[in-house]
Image: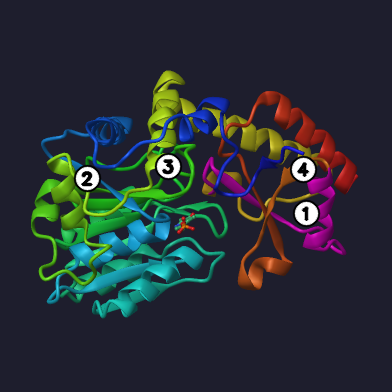
Amino acid sequence: MRYILLNPGPVSLSEGVRRAAVATDLCHREPEFFDLQDRVLDALLQVYGLDPGLWRAVLLAGSGTSALEAMLASLVPEDGRLLVLENGVYGERISLVAGIHRIPSESVGHEWTRPWDLERVADKLARGGFSHVAAVHHETTTGRLNPVTELAGLCRSYAADLLLDTVSSFGAEAIPFDAPALAACALTANKCLHGIPGTSMVLVRDHALRSAVRPARSLTLDLGLWADHQQRRSTPFTPAVNSLQALDQALKELGAAGGWRARHARYHRLADRAAAALAELGVRPFLPAQESSCVLRSYELPAGREYAGVHDGLKRHGFVIYAGQAALAERIFRISTMGDISDYDLARLTAALADVFG
Ligand SMILES: *Cc1c(COP(=O)(O)O)cnc(C)c1O
């Protein structure tokens, strides 16, 4: 049975991407591979129309968390200080990574249900001493889209560089690349870009990359090392070759479909349709739609319904949904409409939801 994945990555693939992943055997020390690497590096900057004179794309082997870890470990210097905003699993993960690399950090914590309190953030920044701020754009824990443009403005006022986890938003949501404080963002191939797992990336301002931490805190997560090799048609280690082949095709398909704005509109339509179908069945959204991303919405489990029953019921219809995390596991379920999902798939989902919740 072919399952439609409604979890937030890995995603249901297009036929073209699935085929591209295994189309040819490629040695990563041959010119054909470096042509592929160059194409992907260029295409990544083109997604948001970034100036190659100001921005660099750096590819890594690893999951989205690898890119996040590489960004933090490579860009916050020994004498720097990091302020982390947390309102979900992934914001808290940033603090975990900072701790592991002994990056001096403080956090502004929030309940997972809450939006950022930017007054508290401003108070912290006003007390001074923070070289960097790190935060999650789309907090996949709840589907909340955090106000990163406002945060970038605050960072500028207090001369702090902003590092963003855009793992579940890059390719489908607006990202404030024009904001001078935004220094870098971390992302992955297998979420809104519709590729397969294995490759993750950091987009970073050239000046931030040039002042990358030396000596590096990690060998395999050293952004400077990967970037230096990639700039001269080389690679320090074996890259995720097949994932890059798939990503090359996925980026072509994103461009042909109208780019990130078209993908944003498409995801929105699909998410609204799923939400409307659930509303008719009495299933309520966990967050207001206007606070949610277009990528993922979370819903309250109706009284007396357990997640396992809902999950298994939908899986019998060919759909894989996603549980809430930690304390939210008993309260919510999540539906992501990222991936190659057709109108027909969505019509079938509506029928499946009616069967399971009706
Ligand atoms: C999925 C996700 C990650 C982690 O990605 P992995 O590929 O599982 O390492 C990090 N941050 C956010 C916001 C995510 O949605």
Q: Which residues are magenta?
A: 292-316
From the top left corner, tell me how far across and down residue 300 is, in percent: 73, 57
Q: Residues within 10 Å of mark 4 (few under 14, many from 20)?
A: some
Q: Which mark is residue 278?
A: 4
Give the residue pinned by disc 2: 179
From the top left corner, tell me how far across and down residue 98 is, in percent: 31, 74
Q: Nearer the viewer, residue 19 or 193?
A: 19
Q: Which mark is residue 311?
A: 1
Q: Is residue 260 visible?
A: no
Q: How is the image coloured?
A: rainbow
Does the magenta portion include 202?
Answer: no
Q: CA distance from mark 2 to mark 1?
A: 41 Å
Q: Residues within 10 Å of mark 1 (few under 14, many from 20)?
A: some
Q: Mark 2 touching mark 3, by CB under 8 A?
A: no
Q: Nearer the viewer, residue 69 or 51?
A: 69
Amino acid under disc 2: Ala
Amino acid under disc 1: His
Q: CA distance from mark 1 to mark 4?
A: 14 Å
